Image (spheres, rainbow, N blue to C red):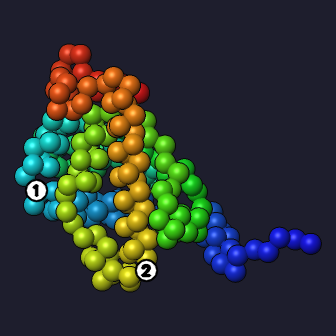
Amino acid sequence: MAAPQSPFSFLDGLFERLAGGPQPPQWLVHEVQHRLVLLVNHVLMQEPEAMERLVRQSGSVARVQWRSYSMALRVTPAGLFDLAGEAAVPDLRVEITDTSPLSLAQTALRGDRPAIRIEGDVQLAAEIQWLADHVRWDVEEDLARIIGDAPAHAIGTVARRVAQALKQFVGMRMAAGRPAPDDGPQAGAPGSDRGAP
């Protein structure tokens, strides 16, 4: 006798069929990413300390990846973000390794951390983790106005779990003897950790 399946497993299969089909046009992907960067920068501009911290990472590139979708952000000299070109080599890579959207949603609703792999510059990871911990913006409330309460809560939970994973990554690297971002040499200075895997 076969094991019972979740009544919602068809949603996962539906997404797989849709994801395997035609992809959105590149101009649409770029436009969505551009608007997301504008939103993030709007939030950062409300926090001068956040911008000051990012200035130290000017020129660094962070890439977030899920399945075939990715977004690369370059830190500007003003302490904000801009889209980095597809050819930009990331200093920090954050990959959500769970490929199932249904599984990600279930993980978020349980309050668990999704499977994430983080590689790269520990100082940049520490600054991004600091932003996640200290920059206040009620993402869920704003998203709920657009997509509803339940999806907004799921997205907010995943974002918090990514921030938690960054914090663990930084903690492990610091425990291994790497200098803290505020204690070590400035990013890009001789002897800095920037770009080290």
Three-letter code for the amino acid on which mark 1 is drawn: Glu
Where residue 194 sits, quadrant-wise, is top left
Q: Position of residue 157 (x, y in %)?
A: 40, 65
Left or right for 25, reference 44: right
Is 1 drawn above or below residue 29 in the view shown? Answer: below
Query: Can I make out residue 40 in this image?
Result: yes
Instruction: Name the residue tied to disc 2.
Output: 150
Give SS at disc 2.
helix
Give SS at disc 1.
loop
For the point 33% across and 30% down, which residue is it? 174
Q: Position of residue 10 (x, y in %)?
A: 69, 76
Where residue 22 sits, quadrant-wise, is bottom right
**Sequence-wise first label, 2 or 1:** 1
For the point 23% across and 51% down, which residue is it? 131
Where residue 57 sits, quadrant-wise, is top left
Left or right for 104, reference 190: right
For the point 31% across and 40% down, which residue is it? 125
Name of the residue lying farthest toward the top: 190
For the point 53% across and 51% down, which residue is it? 115
Q: CA distance from mark 2 to mark 1?
A: 28 Å
Asked if labels 1 and 2 touch by Cβ distance under 8 angstroms, the answer is: no
Three-letter code for the amino acid on which mark 2 is drawn: Ala
Instruction: Name the residue tied to disc 1.
Output: 47
